[in-house]
């Protein structure tokens, strides 16, 4: 997804603050929320304000923070910066103009400053934070929607075990030993993934380190010297990342190499593990990055080298995705293969467009066909079995020959005014839907300049279309 124009870009990092304290200007509730956050991660805080709210007054009494009673001005602020080295500065007075001025002074001194509730004047912003000891998860919207960041934090809080810090501590104690035993980082990662996905992870989360250690030892001793390669044929669905299966998402995070089609959207590719090698092998009309035989050879080559290879396909691998050809080539070479089905373009796009594929009043069957022509441009289909009135016809890859398809359906028995629809970039934010008839649809598509990928649906079910409110 592209970044909206005039949007400030923020790069998320984890900052080592060391022994340097943080400076907070302001003593109200907003300042208190930042101070409590700094305090929970062990950062020393010096607060400057004429008065403090009750919660900060309590921290001063406990000597958890230090307090200086001063009405801050630019001159006194510079004196503060010169007297002590501060790594971070929070500006949380009620005067937004003063906060912006002080932030500019910090920039001159090379000090990171956050003018609270003013991202434009800030050098950093504080994300919503899930804190579990060693494990910290930061969520930010770049200041655009802080309530949304807090909402996402609440969702994560529900699924992250409270013992996750104990798990991180256990893994930390074993880190150096595994580096020595397994110099290859892929081997180490494979062992840890087996540990986390098995019973070892939950045991360590619960603090049962002895049992967790036994599980880890079993994985270490049983781990082969060279990782065994395998291939995963995975359906990425029709475009919306929310339609990925849990199995697909897990394998996307574990793959060493990813060969992906052009129908796989950037938003889905962003969910692939960042250090995985990515190879585009997409095919478009009359243009192939690699031939199918070359794709098969690449899958085999990487798997035989011990890599975990993800073959990521739009829709479902076994519905016009040539997954069967790849499966056969891999099994012929005795390479382990897993197949993870995906929501097909027909199912996903029709649902997002509000078109039922079957309906008891008018369609008791549904037929999937491809409009992909042969090398000579011909399309050989059993038209008499396709042009039936009591079924829905879903045509993949038919945009380039849409007028010919509509003509053939009319020639072989369907009325010229038979309902039809076309869905462009279904399930994505760019989705467009046009409904018409076999006679009118080609011209409507030309007028609206539809592009691939587009899916054609023919049948009376189009008349039952009810666009979903949230589609």
Image (cartoon, rainbow, N blue to C red):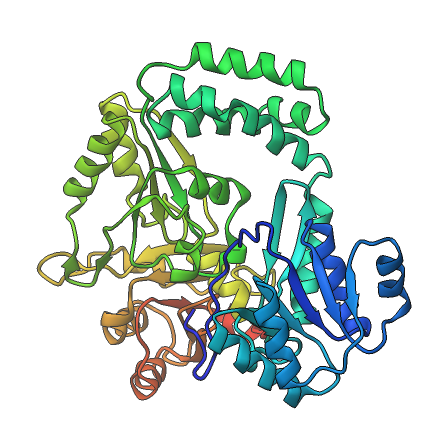
Image x and y of residue 240, in percent:
48, 61
* Residue shown at the point (33%, 78%) measured from the top left: 450
Residue 199's image quarter? top right
| The one of 81 and 300 positioned closer to us in this rendering | 81
* Residue shown at the point (77%, 61%) measured from the top left: 66
Image x and y of residue 434, in percent:
43, 80
Q: Is residue 220 left or right of residue 403?
A: right
| The one of 225 and 418 positioned closer to us in this rendering | 225
| The one of 184 and 215 positioned closer to us in this rendering | 184
| The one of 319 and 37 positioned closer to us in this rendering | 37
Q: Is residue 153 left or right of residue 377?
A: right
Identify the image quadrant of the N terminus.
Answer: bottom left
Image x and y of residue 359, in percent:
58, 62
As drawn, 461 above or below 364: below
Image x and y of residue 139, in percent:
60, 59
- Can residue 469 be seen in this snapshot? no
Residue 310's image quarter? top left
* Residue shown at the point (52%, 46%) measured from the top left: 245
Identify the image quadrant of the C terminus.
Answer: bottom right
As drawn, 326 above or below 46: above
Residue 354's image quarter? bottom right
- Can residue 299 be seen in this snapshot? yes
């Amino acid at each position: 997804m592209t970044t909206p124009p005039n949007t400030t870009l923020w790069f998320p990092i984890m900052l080592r603050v060391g022994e340097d304290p943080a400076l907070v200007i302001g003593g109200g509730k907003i300042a208190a929320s930042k101070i409590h956050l700094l305090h929970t991660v062990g950062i020393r805080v010096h607060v400057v304000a004429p008065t403090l709210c009750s919660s900060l007054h309590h921290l001063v009494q406990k000597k958890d923070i230090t307090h200086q009673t001063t009405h801050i001005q630019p001159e006194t602020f510079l004196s503060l910066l010169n007297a002590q080295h501060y790594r971070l500065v929070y500006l949380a007075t009620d005067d937004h103009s003063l906060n912006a001025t002080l932030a500019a002074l910090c920039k001159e001194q090379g000090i990171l400053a956050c003018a609270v509730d003013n991202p434009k004047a800030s050098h950093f912003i504080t994300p919503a934070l899930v804190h579990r000891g060693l494990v910290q998860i930061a969520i930010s919207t770049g200041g655009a929607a802080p309530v949304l960041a807090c909402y996402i934090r609440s969702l994560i809080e529900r699924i992250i075990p409270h013992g996750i810090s104990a798990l991180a501590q256990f893994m930390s104690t074993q880190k150096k030993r595994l580096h020595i035993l397994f110099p290859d980082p892929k081997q180490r990662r494979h062992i840890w993934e087996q540990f986390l996905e098995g019973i070892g992870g939950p045991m360590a989360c619960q603090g049962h380190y002895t049992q967790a250690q036994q599980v880890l030892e079993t994985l270490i001793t049983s781990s082969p010297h060279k990782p065994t390669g395998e291939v995963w044929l995975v359906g990425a669905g029709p475009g919306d990342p929310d339609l990925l299966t849990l199995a697909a998402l897990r394998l996307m995070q574990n793959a060493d190499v990813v060969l992906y089609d052009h129908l796989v959207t950037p938003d889905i590719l962003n969910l692939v593990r960042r250090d995985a090698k990515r190879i585009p092998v997409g095919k478009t009309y009359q243009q192939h990055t690699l031939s199918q035989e070359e794709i098969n050879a690449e899958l085999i080559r990487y798997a035989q080298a011990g890599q975990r290879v993800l073959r990521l396909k739009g829709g479902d691998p076994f519905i016009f995705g040539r997954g069967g050809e790849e499966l056969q080539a891999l099994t012929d070479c005795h390479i382990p293969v897993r197949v993870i089905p995906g929501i097909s373009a027909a199912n996903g796009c029709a649902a997002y467009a509000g078109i039922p594929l079957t309906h008891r009043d008018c369609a008791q069957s549904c037929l999937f066909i491809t409009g992909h022509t042969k090398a000579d441009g011909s399309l050989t289909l059993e038209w008499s079995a396709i042009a039936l009135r009591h079924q829905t016809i879903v045509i993949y890859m038919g945009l380039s020959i849409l007028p010919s398809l509509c003509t053939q359906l009319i020639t072989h028995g369907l009325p010229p005014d038979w309902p039809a629809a076309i869905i462009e970039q279904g399930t994505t934010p760019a989705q467009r839907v046009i409904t018409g008839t076999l006679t009118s649809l080609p011209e409507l598509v030309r007028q609206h300049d539809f592009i691939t990928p587009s899916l054609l649906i023919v049948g009376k079910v189009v008349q039952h279309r009810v666009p979903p409110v949230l589609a």
